[in-house]
Amino acid sequence: MAYDLEEQEQIDEFKAWWKQYGKTVSSLVIGLVVAYAAYQIWNYVQHKQAIDASTQFQELTVIDQKDLKAIQAKSAAIMEQYSGTPYAARAALFAAKANYAAKDTKSAKAQLDWAVKNAEETATRAMATLQLANILAEEKDYDGALKLLEAKHDAGFEGLFADLKGDLLMLQGKRAEAKAAYELALSKLDAQGKYRVITQRKLEALG
């Protein structure tokens, strides 16, 4: 095919440009293709891991609560193998509950602390924080419990956090601060919820 002079000049310019930058362009394209492929593979692995973790967690929840060794082994495996999924922290919460019921508070605290630090879901992290703070309160580590409650948390749990904070302040004899915490809790708790009634009674008892 014959080209006119202008077309031939454009082709020659493009050939010169390609000679200078062609390898760079090819490398960029190949890099983008590889990155996209890696992203797709990562998505597949994450999806498969989530499904596997869900299955393992369901198996954990049907273990007899009295079979503490089985619960500990299963939850530990989920936390180790599926730490990047929401089910790892859920497994930690489940195991903590079983350990606490068996009076193994040391293990329960360790699992709750892990969930606080590693939970993918803010709600799971908030629940772990509340449970851990309650255990610390039982151990009379009021400052440690209050420090936990000051950390950033899911807004949906603000009422429960404030209520527990009020309890801790009362245990420290700080009535005025406890009253303020209970008032905040009332403003955040569900108006129709049963927990709100309990908080209201605590506040009324302060006068």
Image (cartoon, helix red, strand yellow):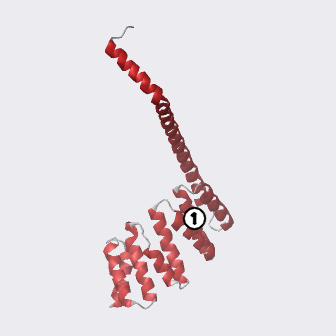
- Camera-side residue: 103 or 19? 19
Work out whether 24 lies above or below 10: below
Work out whether 135 lies above or below 72: below
Disc 1 designates what residue? 92
Q: Position of residue 181 (x, y in %)?
A: 36, 81
Q: Which amino acid lies under the numbered mark 1 shown in the image of this protein?
A: Ala
Work out whether 8 lies above or below 149: above
Work out whether 50 lies above or below 35: below
Which residue does the image show at 43% across and 75% down from the upper left? 150
- Camera-side residue: 57 or 148? 148
- Camera-side residue: 90 or 58? 90
Which residue does the image show at 53% across and 55% down from the upper left? 85
Can residue 62 be seen here? The reply is: no
Q: Position of residue 201 (x, y in %)?
A: 36, 84
Residue at the extreme right of the image, as rendered:
69
Which residue does the image show at 58% across and 73% down from the upper left? 109
Which quadrant is the N terminus positioned in?
top left
Query: What number of labels is visible?
Result: 1
Q: Secondary structure at mark 1?
A: helix
